Amino acid sequence: MNKYLILIFTIIAVLILSGCADKEVNLDNEFSMKLEVGELEAVNQDEQPFSTSDQNGEYWLANFIFTNCNTVCPPMTANMAKMQREMKEAGVEIPIVSFSIDPTNDTPAVMKEYAELYQPDYSTWTFVTGYAPETIERFANVSFMVPAAEEEGTDQFMHSTKFFLIDKEGYVREGYSGLDVPYADVIKDIKKVVD
């Protein structure tokens, strides 16, 4: 009889512990990616130092743009501005970083002028530049597995149109369309992991 009680208590204990584990967010199951974001030193739109390592310890969103873009960047940036407002309304504000893929043209002053068109809240949105073109190309290719290269014979660049969610440990965990943004899904994902 005692053996049966011990067995029953053991099964109950295992079920209780399993139930507790299920309440925690398992990021490997929740998100579709796990790419490590490399170290990148830059400056922001106000010429202040920026480093990707400064973002460690918090979730953040990132995208790639350039100010001279005549196709996807203006709508992407407008969408990111809307994303910032939507997050604020939902009470889940996290930092946003927009990386220039044309640092030769995109000086901090040019980035600031471009940013102003979209009325960002700079307390949570940073526009960065100030590295070599080869550096940002390699950073995009390796850390995000996306292109960032000048289109031959033009002043335009090939680049990703995604918004990326990066976790506290510095891993890219999800990518969302930056042109047809699933705002509710992004906020839902952020709420899963942000207190």
Image (cartoon, grey):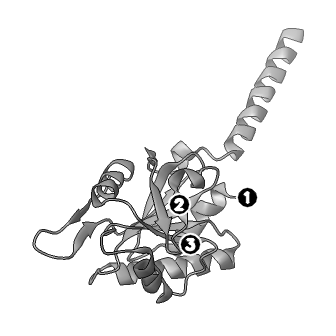
Kindly report which numbered mark, 1 or 2, lies closer to the viewer in this rendering. 2
Foreground residue, 61 or 41? 41
Q: Label 3, label 1: how many angstroms apart (C-alpha)? A: 20 Å
Q: Earlier in the sequence, mark 3 or mark 1?
A: 3
Residue found farthest to the bottom: 117
Q: How many marks?
A: 3
The residue located at (84%, 15%) in the rendering is 6
The residue located at (64%, 74%) in the rendering is 123
Foreground residue, 8 or 95? 95
In the rendered structure, which amino acid carries the disc numbered 1?
A: Asp
Give the label on residue 195, or none.
1
In the rendered structure, which amino acid carries the disc numbered 2?
A: Phe
Residue found farthest to the left: 153
| Residue annotated with mark 2 | 50
The part of the image, by quadrant, that contains residue 190 is bottom right
User: Can residue 78 be seen in this snapshot?
Assistant: no
Instruction: Give the x, y percent position of residue 172.
Output: 47, 52
In the rendered structure, which amino acid carries the disc numbered 3?
A: Trp
Q: Residues within 10 Å of mark 2 (few under 14, many from 20)?
A: some
Instruction: Give the x, y percent position of residue 133.
Output: 29, 61
Give the label on residue 125, or none.
3
The residue located at (38%, 53%) in the rendering is 144
From the viewer's perspective, tell me whether residue 128 is left or right of residue 194: left
Quadrant placement of the N terminus: top right
| Label 3–label 1 contact, CB within 8 A | no
